[in-house]
């Protein structure tokens, strides 16, 4: 699933957290991990919603109320509750981007063949402007290629 402990250590660092705040952070991180899609996402309205681990836990996808981005605010200007949300937002940003990187296959340096895009391959496109627990990644199957001036 991808190193959530590693990311937790990096975003919490040496923050002095009470048991309640740490429990809240871990619960929110659990929701982040359980909101990831485990089936292909589609933008077509008639397609079913992608299956997530949340479906197995509560029977439907996990949702969260959109919150303002407070990752850029200095720590000394935040209340403890805002600091808790800031830690979760930092975690979401790091984990979701690295999780998608883990899904991407990389063969460029392991084989001699030219591994450029080919029809039938999957491509992942990510929307970075969405709040946590919202995955608007689109997985596209390449149908046709239109090479540029350099032939790629």
Image (tube, grey):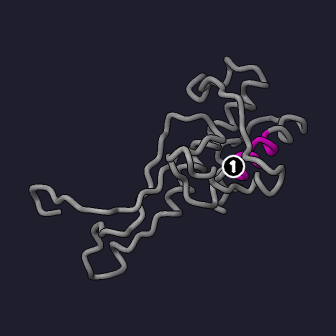
Q: From the viewer's side, name the closer residue of 126 and 146.
A: 146
- Outermost residue toward the bottom? 112
Left or right relative to 39: residue 148: left
> Residue 101, how many percent across, how many down?
49, 58
Residue 30 place in picture, x, y as percent:
77, 49
Measured along the vertical axis of the image, is residue 96 above or below residue 88? below
* Of the pair 48 and 81, the residue shown nearer to us: 48
> Which residue lies most toward the left here?
149
- The secondary structure that dominates the magenta segment is helix
Magenta highlight on residue 19: no
Q: Nearer the viewer, residue 116 or 101?
A: 116
Q: Is residue 147 left or right of residue 140?
A: left
Range of magenta residues? 25-34
Identity of the residue furthest to the top in this view: 77
Give the residue at x 63% y 43%.
Answer: 92
Numbered marks: total: 1
Name the residue nearer the viewer: 135 or 11.
Answer: 135
- Up the image or down, 96 lies above or below 85; here it is below
Q: Is residue 14 above or below residue 103?
A: above
Which residue shows up at 76% across the image and 53% down it? 55
């Amino acid at each position: 699933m991808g190193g959530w402990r590693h990311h937790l250590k990096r975003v919490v660092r040496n923050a002095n957290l009470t048991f309640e705040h740490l429990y809240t952070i871990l619960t929110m991180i659990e929701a982040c991990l359980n909101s990831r899609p485990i089936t292909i996402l589609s933008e077509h309205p008639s397609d079913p919603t992608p299956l997530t681990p949340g479906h197995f836990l509560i029977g439907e996808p996990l949702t969260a109320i959109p919150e303002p981005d407070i990752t850029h605010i200095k720590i000394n200007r935040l209340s403890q509750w805002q600091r808790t949300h800031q830690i979760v937002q930092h975690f979401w940003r790091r984990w979701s981007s690295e999780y998608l990187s883990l899904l991407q296959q990389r063969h460029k340096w392991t084989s001699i063949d030219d591994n450029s895009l080919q029809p039938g391959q999957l491509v992942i496109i990510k929307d970075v402007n969405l709040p946590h627990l919202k995955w608007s990644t689109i997985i596209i199957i390449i149908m046709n290629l239109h090479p540029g001036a350099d032939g790629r």
